Image (tube, grey):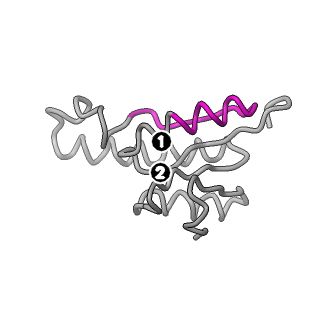
Amino acid sequence: MVGKYKVITLCGSTRFKDAFMEAQKKLTLEGNIVISVGLFGHSGDSEVWEGMSEDTLTQTKIMLDDMHKRKIDMADEIFVINVGGYIGSSTKSEIEYAHANGKPVRYLEESHGSL
């Protein structure tokens, strides 16, 4: 909590940019501080990756994954954007990280259940 506001970190595949934006708006209007991804590598920020060497690309992805775990550290809970029940390997590792650190996990689509 920061003051009276719960802090929620969004997790999920960046291919679901519209769902991220919708969840961010909804959760913010509900009175939460929302932490999201820094870029949408799978749906619109392709210029970020253009011209990167394989080594730089690998190091950047490692940095972004680590940075997102730090965002989870700052949060009271995570909210998983699991459109159609989809949870990729990076998101799965973030869910496992949140569980291991005592963070509640909520899902956009509850029918998926929890890991």
**Residue 12, labelled with which disc?**
2
**Dividing the image into 4 quarters, which one contains the C terminus?**
bottom right
User: Which residue is painted at 21% across and 45% down in the image?
Assistant: 55
Residue 40 screen position, x and y as percent: 37, 37
User: Which residue is painted at 61% across and 43% down in the image?
Assistant: 9
**Residue 57, labelled with which disc?**
none
Q: In this view, does 60 lie to the left or right of 111?
A: left
User: Which residue is painted at 66% across and 63% down in the image?
Assistant: 99
Q: In this view, does 63 lie to the left or right of 1?
A: left
Disc 1: which residue: 19
Residue 84 screen position, x and y as percent: 44, 59
Up/down of 37 relative to 115, above or below:
above
Q: Is residue 109 left or right of residue 40?
A: right
Amino acid type of the residue that numbered disc 1 sits on in the rendered structure = Ala
User: Which residue is painted at 69% across and 49% down in the image?
Assistant: 77
**Dividing the image into 4 quarters, which one contains the N terminus?**
top right
> If you read the primary sequence from the N terminus, does the residue marked by circle 1 or circle 2 appear first?
2
Span highlighted in magenta in the image: 22-39
Q: How crowded is mark 1: few (under 14 residues within 10 Å), some or many (20 or more)?
A: some
Q: How crowded is mark 2: few (under 14 residues within 10 Å), some or many (20 or more)?
A: many
Up/down of 66 relative to 94, above or below:
above
- The residue closer to the viewer here, 63 or 29, is 29
Q: Does the magenta stretch include residue 51?
A: no
Mark 1 and mark 2 in contact? Answer it, CB < 8 Å: yes
Under tag 1, what secondary structure? helix
Under tag 2, what secondary structure? strand
Residue 104 screen position, x and y as percent: 71, 57
Amino acid type of the residue that numbered disc 2 sits on in the rendered structure = Gly
